[in-house]
Image: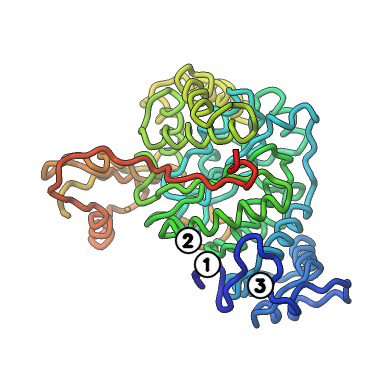
């Protein structure tokens, strides 16, 4: 396993191997709780933390006993030294149990599904997929996150719609699932508060790419949801946390393995992120493009990923006989407007003025742009002269209207002087170095025009599903 993902030497056990190194296994008998500096030292020096150690750390984080420096130190120790599957599972469970557990009517169980992404540039799949699945009869209690590193957060994007409230109580979530079929919410003091704190700290401590921290963060939010099935979209490529498919497959395999151990039916899709998904990058711009997809239009790569991930979920949860049949149902929800109707209901149910929600979902692209935050200026880059926003401090405000629009597709023939990128900015014009950096992202070749391949590469299944 690459040391940069799991941590330093020795390499972690392969998925399914929880034995560790025999005598260095987790202690059987509980001992006196260790102090945080001792826990940090153990992990810093490459030791293994017991379940009690991990629960003690998470409890200190949630109850405010852990200082920011101690949280950062532990995250970095985990990033450098790694965790085995048993430690990762214990961290996932402790984070999941740090807040209230969600309970739904038993009749809903087969319908409860969700999707999570490791993040990429222009990834607005959740905005489309949650209402599309709701239109297919699912219940989608999506607990999502903020932006990490250069990847935009689903919650940040939704908050570009004036009035949208990502904080919903479990009771409010149940009402939304009853009436709409989906909700997209954030962590709160009630829901997975431990992960909310660690998630924000990872973003500002260069520990975003830690495999055990990613696994625990994703699955802890999903364990509390009581799901029938979960698909994790694991991105790989130049614009993803993981640069190559092998590293992404390693995370996918661990996610599936830890999920099985926690009683969660998880599949992991490997999808390419060598270019932005769709054409729009930036919070408001991505909401606009998500609405285009729910109009039955928009970029083909976005639609392809939404339908294939949705099809996999409908099949995994037993609501479709095959993945292809499930994908066809999701596509129909996009084309007949039912997904967009659910999106409108979700907006109104989560605080958006019903008139604004209706106008957004029924308006033209030009009308929608007038209803959402906009950048002050637009600037186009031309071809050929031969673009990464994020926070530097947890909780920093975002400029919701800024971003970029790709005006061309991969494989398209361009002429000299053709605009290929439109930058939506606040403040001064692009500087020379900024403009050069953006222009260098455009790579031209003399090959014949071609259709860009689907970003969907493969699906890693839990053992029982893989045997079907």
Q: Nearer the viewer, residue 420 or 239?
A: 239
Horizontal and vertical percent for residue 297?
38, 25
In the image, taking residue 37 as reference, residue 240 lies left or right, namely: left
Q: Are marks 3 and 1 in contact (CB under 8 Å)?
A: no
Label 3, on which residue? 74
Which residue is label 1 attached to?
5
For marks 3 and 1, give the CA distance: 16 Å
Query: Is 406 positioned to the left or the right of 167 in the image?
Result: left
Q: Residue at x 54, y 48 (%)?
A: 460
The answer to whether the residues at label 2 and label 1 have Cβ atoms under 8 Å apart is yes
Circle 2 SS class:
helix
**Residue under the image location 16 percent in, 47 percent down:** 383
At numbered mark 1, what does the secondary structure look like: helix, strand or loop? Answer: helix
Point out residue 349 in the picture as x, y percentages from the top left corner: 65, 27
**Quarter of the figure with the C terminus:** top right
Comes first in the chain, label 3 or label 1? 1
- Dot 2: within a 10 Å radius of its alpha carbon, few (fewer than 14), some, or many (20 or more) residues? many
Give the residue drawn at x 71%, y 64%.
86
What's the distance in space between the residues labelled 2 and 3, CA to CA?
A: 23 Å
SS under mark 3: helix
């Amino acid at each position: 396993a690459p040391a940069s993902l799991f941590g330093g030497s020795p390499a972690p056990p392969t998925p399914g191997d929880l034995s560790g190194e025999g005598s260095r296994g987790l202690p059987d008998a509980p001992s006196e709780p260790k102090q945080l500096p001792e826990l940090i030292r153990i992990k810093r020096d490459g030791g293994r933390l017991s379940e009690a150690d991990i629960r003690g750390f998470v409890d200190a984080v949630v109850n405010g006993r852990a200082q920011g420096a101690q949280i950062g130190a532990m995250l970095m120790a985990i990033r450098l030294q790694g965790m085995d599957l048993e430690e990762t599972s214990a961290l996932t469970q402790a984070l999941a149990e740090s807040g209230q557990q969600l309970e739904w009517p038993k009749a809903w169980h087969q319908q409860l599904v969700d999707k999570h992404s490791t993040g990429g540039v222009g990834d607005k799949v959740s905005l489309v997929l949650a209402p599309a699945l709701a239109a297919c009869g699912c219940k989608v209690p999506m607990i999502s996150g903020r932006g990490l590193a250069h990847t935009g957060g689903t919650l940040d994007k939704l908050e570009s719609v004036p009035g949208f409230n990502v904080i919903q109580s479990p009771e409010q979530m149940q009402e939304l699932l009853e009436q709409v079929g989906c909700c997209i919410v954030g962590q709160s003091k009630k829901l997975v508060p431990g992960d909310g704190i660690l998630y924000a700290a990872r973003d500002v401590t260069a520990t975003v790419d830690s495999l055990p921290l990613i696994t625990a963060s994703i699955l802890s939010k999903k364990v509390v949801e009581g799901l029938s099935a979960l698909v994790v979209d694991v991105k790989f490529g130049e614009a993803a946390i993981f640069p190559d498919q092998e590293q992404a497959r390693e995370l996918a395999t661990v996610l599936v393995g830890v999920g099985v151990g926690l009683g969660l039916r998880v599949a992991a899709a490997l999808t390419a992120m060598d270019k932005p998904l769709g054409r729009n990058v930036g919070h408001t711009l991505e909401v606009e493009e998500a609405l285009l997809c729910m109009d039955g239009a928009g970029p083909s790569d976005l639609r392809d990923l939404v339908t294939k991930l949705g099809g996999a979920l409908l099949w995994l949860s037993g609501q479709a006989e095959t993945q292809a049949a499930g994908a066809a149902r999701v596509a129909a929800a996009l084309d007949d407007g039912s997904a967009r109707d659910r999106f409108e209901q979700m907006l109104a149910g989560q605080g958006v003025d019903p008139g604004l929600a209706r106008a957004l979902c029924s308006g033209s692209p030009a009308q929608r742009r007038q209803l959402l935050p906009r950048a002050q200026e637009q600037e186009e880059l031309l071809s050929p002269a031969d673009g990464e926003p994020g926070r530097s401090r947890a909780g920093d405000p975002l400029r919701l209207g800024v971003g970029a629009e790709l005006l061309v597709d991969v494989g398209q023939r361009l002429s000299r002087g053709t605009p290929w990128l439109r930058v939506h900015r606040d403040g001064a014009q692009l500087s020379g170095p900024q403009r050069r950096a953006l222009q260098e992202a455009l790579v031209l070749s003399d090959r014949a025009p071609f259709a860009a391949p689907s970003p969907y590469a493969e699906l890693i299944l839990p053992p029982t599903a893989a045997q079907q």
